[in-house]
Image (tube, helix red, strand yellow):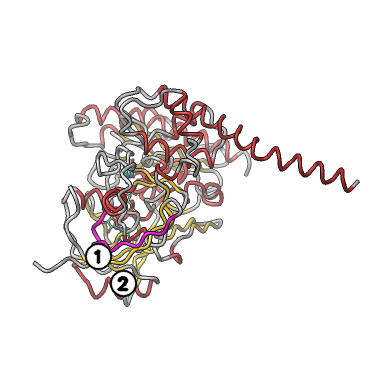
Amino acid sequence: MKPPPFGYSRPESVVEALSTLASLGPDGKVLAGGQSLLPILSMRLAAPHHLVDINRLAELDYVRSDASTVRVGALARHARVLADAGARAAQPLLAQALRLVAHATIRNRGTTLGSIVHADPSGEMTAVLALLDGSVRVAGASNERQVPAGEFFRGPLESAVQAGELAVEASFPALAPRAGTAFVEVSRRHGDYAVCGVAALVEIDVDRAVVVARTAYLSVSPIPLVLDLCETAGDFAAAAALARERLDPEPDIHASADYRRHLAGVLTERALRGAHAAAVERSAHV
Amino acid sequence: MSEEERFDVRLIVNGAAHDVQVPARRLLSDCIRHDLRLTGTHVGCEHGVCGACTVLVDGVAMRSCLMLTVSADGTEITTVEGLTEPDGTLSPVQQAFEDCHGLQCGFCTPGFLTTITAGLRTNPDPSEDEARELIGGNLCRCTGYQNIVRSVLRAAELQSARDRATLAPAEGAGVAQSEGRA
Ligand SMILES: Cc1cc2nc3c(=O)[nH]c(=O)nc-3n(C[C@H](O)[C@H](O)[C@H](O)COP(=O)(O)OP(=O)(O)OC[C@H]3O[C@@H](n4cnc5c(N)ncnc54)[C@H](O)[C@@H]3O)c2cc1C
């Protein structure tokens, strides 16, 4: 099928984009990479009145990293973030997750921030933002706010970005010196949305005791779910059992609830072990 | 119902400028096929999964079914028709598909050819694993992919042979010149 008719604007600056979005209000819809929005339009699952195309906003095409944060502008495509050496060094989880987002051709066009705003519970980058406790800067015509990940995801395909607003930047905290991350998932084919996926963050202290053990899940909950598994103190099999208990996945055509819970347990252990190994390796260089 | 608003768009397709007036909802794939009548670009799933419609936008592989024509205004686009040399010689990737039987029905082929062409520019000497990764986003229902993987590796060989051939005379000339000067 083809998309239904809609109006179209292509602002050349963020200021212009914000005033266009403000004047359109609920009739406006942001078009970023279009890798989620265009399939939705072509399948006629949505019929927005007017698209505001942000692909000319070169000022938002950036990835900036320093010792504390990786900042990703709204026009930075997945491929660019994945290839960014500074981002990879500051927060390795970004590249670990991005290589699992769709295929290279989709990553050439789709934006990382777009996938976060899209708030698909199967999206890798939503889990990354949630696990790291990152945030999104959201701008309106007259105000700006920084929304923490914990308040950003409202439901499946629903974020805190309101009509008339533009998400301008995602911030991902950099990795602590004695911490490590891992991202593992099971999908039917490489590049497909995952049946289940787990991102893990582990931090150890000078005596190598685990002080942080956190996981975030794909495709098992309506919004990215983060579990604090630190109480299992480095026993990752126990952590997996705890995760299985706390998760309540829904069945769908791809997997039963039981199979998803089983996968979540297996992947929890695998991701925590990977993140722990990375933390040990990294703290050798502290 | 009122006429749908149309937008002026300029596309440079395979080196030639085209000016079209299209409604905002015209997919780039439909513009290429219907407005420009370049039917080499195929449309399969129309939601980004199959890869048949892949074209190069400013040299980068993208799904033309997931792009609005208006968004592509001012870009340079290469479709499968633009891969062949001006004298009709098949490109290394096209030649490799012929050599290795990388196609049967041919429906998916344009998307593979464009994807691989761009992929070999960034990685001219892929391993077999990298070749598989490169074509991972394109579906083929005939070949079982093995011959397409072979085609990627063969295309890399053909490309480097052609690069050597075009470099060789220039190098020769350079040597002659420096000898002349000495
Ligand atoms: C075949 C295929 C496979 C895929 N597989 C995966 C996968 O495995 N994992 C995964 O995570 N994703 C996958 N995707 C989706 C892909 O990552 C998209 O690029 C991403 O979800 C959306 O980013 P976009 O820039 O394309 O946004 P768009 O499609 O342009 O927009 C998506 C939504 O977000 C809104 N939006 C976007 N940017 C902003 C902004 N800056 N401010 C306000 N609103 C905004 C839009 O209005 C729209 O509602 C896949 C897509 C395809 C076609």
Can marks 2 and 1 be said to lie on one chain?
A: yes
Residue sitting nearer the eye, A202 or B44: B44
Q: Residue at 31% x, 53% y: name it.
A: B36
Q: Amino acid at mark 2?
A: Gly
Instruction: Determine the chain carrying the residue at label 2.
Output: A
Q: Residue at 50% x, 26% y: name it.
A: B128
A252 is higher (above) or lower (below) than A129: above
Q: Is residue A253 toward the left or the right of residue B159 in the image?
A: left
Q: Which quadrant of the figure has residue B94?
A: top left
Q: Which residue is mark 2?
A: A140
Instruction: Determine the chain carrying the residue at label 1.
Output: A
Residue sitting nearer the eye, A158 or A18: A18
Q: Which residue is mark 1?
A: A162
**Label 2–label 1 contact, CB within 8 A:** yes
Q: Which quadrant of the figure has residue A286?
A: top right
Q: Which residues are magenta?
A: B16-28
Q: Which quadrant of the figure has residue A232?
A: top left
Residue sitting nearer the eye, B173 or B77: B173
**Residue B20 within the segment the image draws in magenta:** yes
